Amino acid sequence: MTDHVRIGVLGAATIAPTAVIRPARSSTVAEVVAVAARSAAKAQAFADRHGIARVHGSYEDLLADPAVDAVYNPLPNGLHGKWTLAALEAGKHVLCEKPFTANAAEAAAVAAAANASGLVVMEAFHYRYHPLALRVAEIIGSGVLGPLRHVEATVAFPLPKFSDIRYDYSLAGGATMDAGCYAVHMARLLGGEEPEVRSAKALLRGPSIDRAMRASLRFPSGHTGSVHASLWSSTVLKLSMKAIGENGTLKVFNPLGPQVAHRLSLRLRDSRSTERFGKRPTYAYQLDAFTDAVLHGKPFPTTADDAVRTMTVIDAIYRAAGLPLRQPSA
């Protein structure tokens, strides 16, 4: 590997074409060269559909493939940690789908292995690499809003298919793990510090599975926060971020998919402005950042250590809601 990154995909996941396969086609430095699935037939069908040359009938075989430099890990939540560790042991860089692991303890173990390996391990919070999110970080960091008072993040979308793996506790499912990890990450970005969870309330699909979650936060500097995540509730569809300071308010509509419809509004005491950004997909920017890190050592924000901090908040939300922490799948 000198001038491009050869990527293998673990699992024939429906997110893989959007997250890496299509972005790689327009990249000069990334190529999806292999796929593995639970059966060779499933892997072959996926490869045929997406024009992938190499097919493996097991994840272990893909990790042993010398033609693979890096792994994209979109497996169910409860398997993220296990196969990220296996990829590191095989000497592969990893782009791991969110949430990074099943819980904070597992995230800390993976982060320790990542830091010791010298390999790139990136959590796939694709929104964070788009110019929209970079602009949000710039505004928050500039202090133009003045001392913060309150931040909010909501990620709600309908998923009425209750047989979906995101409702499966044995696979570390739940609304807070899926939609909620975005909301938590956004609240951390807006708040600028690591929050304490003051309270949380879940709507349940089953005894241990949340279909929606609301949580209240407090940051060390005194400002408050709230996160709302939903896969099935009266809030059918809402994607938003908001930061309120003494001098003004920042609002973002649809931070997850700026290539579709999005808007950043900044209202200060003496001015108002609205910004929009280009339609290049968030996932393309993420792939750029991943390959830059692999090939050139360029720093990136969604590191394994950052993932530990996000998972720590998620664990605290589950505890505050009286629900058990998610656990790694066998």
Image (tube, rainbow, N blue to C red):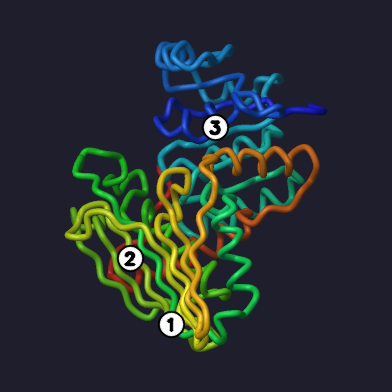
Nearer-the-camera pick, 86 or 167: 167
The secondary structure type at the circle numbered 1 is strand
Q: Look at 53% across and 27% down and name the residue there.
A: 22
Indicate the quadrant containing the N terminus: top left, top right, bottom left or bottom right.
top right
Label 3–label 1 contact, CB within 8 A: no
Instruction: Quadrant for residue 20, please give it.
Output: top right
Amino acid at circle 3: Val
> Label 3: few (<14), some or many (≥20) within 10 Å?
many
Distance between the alpha carbons at the discs numbered 1 and 2? 14 Å
Label 1–label 2 contact, CB within 8 A: no
Q: Earlier in the sequence, mark 3 or mark 2?
A: 3
Instruction: Quadrant for residue 290, please give it.
Output: top right
The secondary structure type at the circle numbered 3 is helix
Residue that badge 2 annotates: 228
Q: Look at 25% across and 55% down and name the residue there.
A: 209
Nearer-the-camera pick, 244 or 43: 244
Amino acid at circle 1: Thr
Distance between the alpha carbons at the discs numbered 3 and 1? 36 Å
Q: Earlier in the sequence, mark 3 or mark 1?
A: 3
Q: Which mark is residue 20?
A: 3
Residue that badge 1 annotates: 224
Q: Look at 30% across and 58% down and name the residue there.
A: 238
> Label 2: few (<14), some or many (≥20) within 10 Å?
many
x and y, in percent, of residue 254 in the image: 40, 55
Q: Count numbered badges in the picture.
A: 3
Q: Is residue 47 left or right of residue 205?
A: right
Amino acid at circle 2: His
